[in-house]
Image (cartoon, helix red, strand yellow):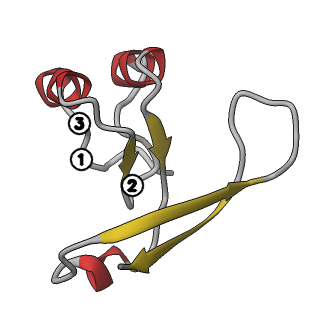
Amino acid sequence: HFNNYPVVDMEFAEFMVERKIKILGMDTPSPDKPPFPVHRLLLKNEIFILENLANLEALLDVEKFEVIALPLNIKADSSILRVVAKVV
């Protein structure tokens, strides 16, 4: 069960909204837990949430990179993605 993971607190979520962040990517299953207030705030402000990412440590010393996220072509509120980082 995936219920013991760190979460994003509301203060940081509000900071991301103020800074007009476009994407939050993480290696955990979710930025928050039920009833999902962080999810609602981020999505309401068009901030995409990328969950369960792998190999993020490869970007620790990278100064600049692009994120490419390719969802399945389905009609749904979420999708499995293929996510890659392109160093620029």
| Residue 9 lies in quadrant | top left
Relative to 15, say whether 72 is above or below. below
- Outermost residue, front side: 88
Q: CA distance from mark 2 to mark 3?
A: 11 Å
- First-in-chain label (2 vs 1): 1
The reply to whether the C-beta atoms of the residues labelled 1 and 3 are less than 8 Å apart is: no
Q: For the residue marked with disc 3, what is the amino acid?
A: Val
The residue indicated by pointer 2 is 28
- Outermost residue, right side: 74
Instruction: Choose between 57 and 19: the one closer to the eye.
Output: 19
Residue 30 - label: none
The reply to whether the C-beta atoms of the residues labelled 2 and 1 are less than 8 Å apart is: yes
Q: For the residue marked with disc 1, what is the amino acid?
A: Pro
Residue at x-position 72% and y-position 44%: 79
Q: Secondary structure at mark 3?
A: loop
The residue indicated by pointer 3 is 8
Instruction: Decide if residue 14 is on the left or right side of residue 54.
Output: left
Q: Secondary structure at mark 2?
A: loop
Q: CA distance from mark 1 to mark 3?
A: 7 Å
For disc 2, the neighbor class at 10 Å (few under 14, some 14 to 19, many from 20) is some
Q: CA distance from mark 2 to mark 1?
A: 8 Å
Instruction: Decide if residue 29 is on the left or right side of residue 88.
Output: right
Q: Secondary structure at mark 1?
A: loop
Instruction: Choose between 49 and 23: the one closer to the eye.
Output: 23
| Residue 88 lies in quadrant | bottom left
